[in-house]
């Protein structure tokens, strides 16, 4: 079911942009499974945006997904992978590492450093600005 949720979310994010441009940028959405989630697989390749919630029905989680959906192309341009964890009972390795209390948004750079932790939903404009301030992103823009 978790892989189905990731597929549905990834498809859901691509629909509005595809309708506007004819090209469908896709934000990779991953739901950690019961196995250990190794963040080092993304080292120097992708930035991680992790959204924690106690339930997929949490109003803050729904708002965050709506905000992300509105500007998917900005996140795709910045090499962002979305990780969703809405099952506190699973006690995932991500939950043990970041210790969310209810809803939490975490932004991890390509160097695996945590750059942002927020207890409330953020829009893509704010997230993009935070990414654009990262040293690796500045170097990407120069090149």
Image (spheres, grey):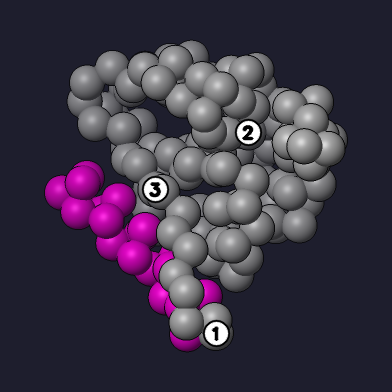
Residue 40 vs residue 69: left or right?
Answer: left
- Tell which tag, 1 or 3, sits nearer the viewer: 1
* Percent x, y of residue 20: 55, 84
Q: Residue at x 81, y 46 (%)?
A: 129
Residue projecting furthest to the front: 143
Q: CA distance from mark 1 to mark 3?
A: 21 Å
Count residues near mark 2 (Cα–Cα under 10 Å), then give few for <14, some for 14-19, many for 20+: many
Q: Residue at x 53, y 66 (%)?
A: 69
Dot 1 or dot 3, earlier in sequence: 1
Tag shown at residue 107: 2
Q: CA distance from mark 1 to mark 2?
A: 28 Å
Count residues near mark 3 (Cα–Cα under 10 Å), then give few for <14, some for 14-19, many for 20+: many
* Percent x, y of residue 99: 52, 20
Q: Residue at x 40, y 21 (%)?
A: 41
Q: Which residue is mark 1?
A: 20
Q: Which residue is mark 3?
A: 29
Classify mark 2: helix, strand or loop.
strand
Residue bounds of the magenta highlight: 1-19
Q: CA distance from mark 2 to mark 3?
A: 14 Å
Dot 1 or dot 2, earlier in sequence: 1
Q: Toward the viewer: 95 or 132? A: 132
């Amino acid at each position: 079911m978790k892989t189905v949720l990731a597929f549905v979310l990834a498809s859901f994010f691509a629909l509005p942009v595809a309708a506007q441009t004819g090209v469908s940028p896709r934000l990779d959405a991953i739901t950690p499974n019961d196995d250990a989630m190794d963040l080092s697989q993304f080292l120097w390749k992708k930035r991680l945006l992790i959204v924690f919630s106690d339930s997929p029905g949490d109003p803050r989680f729904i708002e965050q997904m709506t905000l992300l959906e509105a500007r998917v192309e900005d996140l795709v341009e910045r090499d962002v992978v979305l990780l969703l964890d809405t099952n506190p009972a699973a006690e995932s390795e991500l939950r043990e590492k970041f210790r969310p209390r209810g809803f939490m948004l975490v932004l991890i750079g390509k160097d695996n450093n945590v750059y942002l932790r927020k207890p409330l939903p953020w829009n893509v404009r704010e997230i993009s600005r935070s990414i654009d301030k990262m040293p690796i992103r500045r170097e990407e823009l120069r090149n």
